[in-house]
Every structure is written in structure tokens, then in C-alpha cells.
Image (cartoon, grey):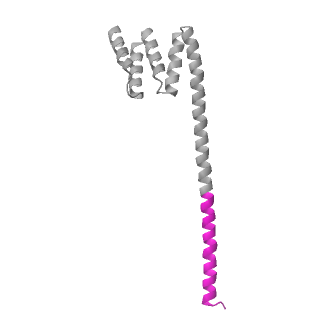
Amino acid sequence: MSTPAANRGEQWEKIRIDSRRGEEQDRQKFVSVRILVLGVFLGAGGLLQSAGTDVLGFQKQLAAAQEETDKPAIIELSRRIVEADPQDSTTWETLARTQFEVAEYNRCTATLNAWANEVKPTPAVLDDLRGDVAEAR
């Protein structure tokens, strides 16, 4: 027959074992979360690096298209660059000016509106371009 003291000892031992199991499970969860977070950061870094690489490639292609005065290519490449880097005011301006030059006034207006929404403070040249579009219509 076991005594009450022996029963309490067994109960305490079970509690210690359960506690250790809980601590081990917590450690495993913590390690799993750390691995997940690390994976997310590495994946995001890869995406950012990939986007940066794409932008550089697009910028090289844009320079070549500008050299050849290939306006459809300039428009498409500029659009891709500002999609990847919406803070690039130089490329926004290239896109808007080229759309204006080929008389795509509605698209130019949409570009100017998108540019104004993306870049703060709004570049002064944007108002000049709006005036050019209004005058051309």
C-alpha cells in the first residue's frame, strides 16, 4: 500500500515530467517560429533583390530604347520600372513625356495621376505636364 506522502511524491514527479514536456514543446515551437521568420526574411530579401535586378535590366533596356527613339518600348519599359520602383520620378517623367509625344493624352493623364499619388511631395514638373496635356487636347 502506498502512503499519502508517496502518492504526493509521485504526483509531483508527474507534474515535473509534464512541465518538462511543456517546456520542450515550447522550445520546439519557438525554434519553429524562428525558422519560419528567418525563411520569410530570406524570401523577401530574394524578392527585393530580384526586383532590383529587374529594374536594372529594364533601365539598361530603356536607355537602349531611348537611343533608338523606340517610343512604344520606352513607354512599356518605363511603365515596368515605375511599377517596380514607384518613387522613381525620373522614369515617371519619361513615361509621361513619351505618352504625350505620341498623343496618348488619356494615358498620359492617368500616368500623371498615378505619379502624383505615388510620389510626395508632388514634383513641380507634373503640373507643367498637366498643362501641356490640357493645351494639346
Q: Is residue 125 left or right of residue 74?
A: left
The one of 90 and 65 positioned closer to us in this rendering: 90
Mark yes or no: residue 84 visible.
yes
Q: Is residue 12 above or below residue 107?
A: below
Magenta stretch encompasses residue 3: yes
Q: Quadrant of the C terminus?
A: top left
The quarter of the picture where residue 6 lies is: bottom right
Residue 17 appears at what percent x and percent y? 64, 73
**Bounds of the magenta segment:** 1-29
Q: What residue appears at the point 59 percent right and 26 percent down from the top-left corner?
A: 54
Q: What residue appears at the point 63 percent right and 64 percent down from the top-left corner?
A: 24
Residue 26 appears at what percent x and percent y? 59, 61
- Prevailing secondary structure of the magenta residues: helix
Residue 66 appears at what percent x and percent y? 54, 11
Q: Is residue 94 left or right of residue 131?
A: right
Q: What residue appears at the point 60 percent right and 31 percent down from the top-left corner?
A: 50
Residue 18 appears at what percent x and percent y? 61, 71
The quarter of the picture where residue 65 lies is: top right
Q: Quadrant of the N terminus?
A: bottom right
Q: Is residue 29 left or right of residue 121?
A: right
Q: What residue appears at the point 47 percent right and 20 percent down from the top-left corner?
A: 90
Magenta stretch encompasses residue 9: yes
Q: Is residue 81 above or below residue 105?
A: below
Residue lying at the far right in this picture: please name it. Answer: 1
Mark yes or no: residue 102 visible.
no
